[in-house]
Amino acid sequence: MSLQKLLFKFILLLVILTIAITSCQQKPVATKQTPPQLSATRKKPICCESNLPQRFQAAVARQTAIQAAGNPSHSGMVLIKSGTFMMGGDNKQAADDEYPKHKVTVNSFWIDATEVTNAQFAKFVKATGYLTTAERKPDWEELKKQLPPNTPKPDESLLVPASLIFKQPGKPVSLTDYSQWWVWQKGADWKHPHGPSSNIKGKDNYPVVHVSWYDAQAYCKWAGKRLPTEAEWEWAARGGLSNNIYPWGNEPVDAGLPKANTWQGNFPNTNTVRDHFFYLAPVASFKPNGYGLYDMAGNVWEWCADYYNNTYYATINKANGVSNPRGPANSYDPDEPYAKKRVIRGGSFLCNDTYCSGYRVARRMKSTEDSGMEHLGFRCVKDAVDAPVIKL
């Protein structure tokens, strides 16, 4: 999901973003009810990146006060042994920020076998009374600090608890206009994934969504865990395979039996549902990778700990490599130089090869820390006593 201008009544963040982009001399479409179109200068679509403006939380102090009170055991986790591998793009679909490929060594760590579920997140909320970013009114005074100077304040009616939901268009649309399938929905949050009239009854084992990076961090702290680094995530996703494109190998995602929850057909208006899921799938609905990890491709994007910087890989010593990288010191996305972003990995149920190949193990995406979306979740890791290094 990307920074797009999803207009006045639909998207606050995208509205603010509309204004922000306008200030950068991109022309919006002057239509009253239709969200503005993307600038013709944007050369390639980014289906699942979130370019939403930074939405700060009013209760950051509350998050930092949450102590590890969840079950700190290794239940539901898999031990990933330390190893050395070549990190980065493996095929012609690789984006510029996936290069250069470089040597990385990571220590052993435990990682959740599945994405964090609604049931798990509900226990956290019950124990702490935590309110997610999507459930809070955005604080304009904090928000504008992350926007270009002199960005005007949006109408107060837009500064409401809300999140982004997917809305399928009824016909083919331009893939350069994300507003054709994303809606800023008041009342959408982790308990109401499609908006206020929806719920998660009977979906305890579905991945929790509409969680910001802050929300994921708060859960991890409560659970005695942390978010994976980008390097840890990719090492785990590769499942013991060397320089393969996907967690399962090199077979294209739509060849053979369904291997992940992705979009089949013409995105975003036609989904053949060959994999049996239109929206989210229960966790572990597809075969795990070689390490026993489920949904490392598709279903939902997953937060990582690292800042996103489009040139980060170029700073790594390609000859000697790097051990346990923690990402760049600062965030930078040339598409939105004012926004602070974190890496997201793994793709989602909306990814399709004609538009987005996020389910590739090397695929890097990014989102502002306050972003919540219908296809964005997370999984946790814990440090482990190091084991002998495995080289791939």
Image: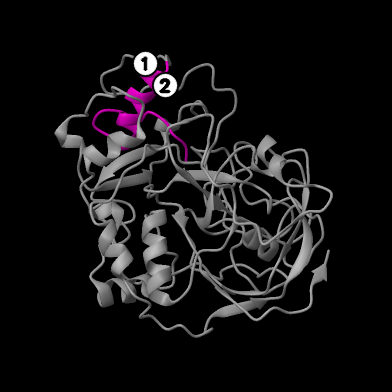
In percent of width and height, residue 47 lies at 53, 38
Query: Looking at the image, which residue is at 77% across and 49% down?
Result: 102
> What's the residue type where badge 2 is placed?
Gln
| Place of residue 159 in the rendered image (x, y in percent of width and height, measured from the top left) | 20, 39
Decide whether residue 15 is among the magenta residues: yes
Query: Residue sitting at 57 percent across and 38 percent down?
Result: 266
Colour mode of the rendering: one colour
Work out whether residue 201 or residue 116 is closer to the camera in this orientation and state it.
116
Q: Position of residue 140 (x, y in %)?
A: 22, 38
Q: Quadrant of residue 182?
A: top left
Q: Is residue 263 magenta?
A: no
Mark 1 residue type: Val
Quadrant, the C terminus: bottom right
Q: Determine which residue is flagged by label 1.
A: 29
User: Is residue 25 visible in this depiction of the protein?
Assistant: yes
Q: Which mark is residue 37?
A: 2
The percent coordinates of residue 347 (x first, y second) are 57, 51
Point out the residue furthest to the left here.
156
Q: Is residue 24 above or below residue 114?
A: above
Mark 2 and mark 1 residues within 8 Å of each other at the beta carbon: yes
Give the camera-side residue of 114 and 331. 331
The vertical placement of 242 against 166, above or below, is below
Q: Nearer the viewer, residue 313 or 193?
A: 313
Residue located at (37% from left, 74% from top)? 222
Q: CA distance from mark 2 to mark 1?
A: 6 Å
* Mark toward the start of the polypeptide (2 vs 1): 1
Residue at 54% in and 59% down: 276
Q: Secondary structure at mark 1?
A: loop
Q: Which residues are magenta?
A: 1-24
Residue 141 sits in quarter: top left
From the viewer's perspective, tell me whether residue 348 is left or right of residue 131: right
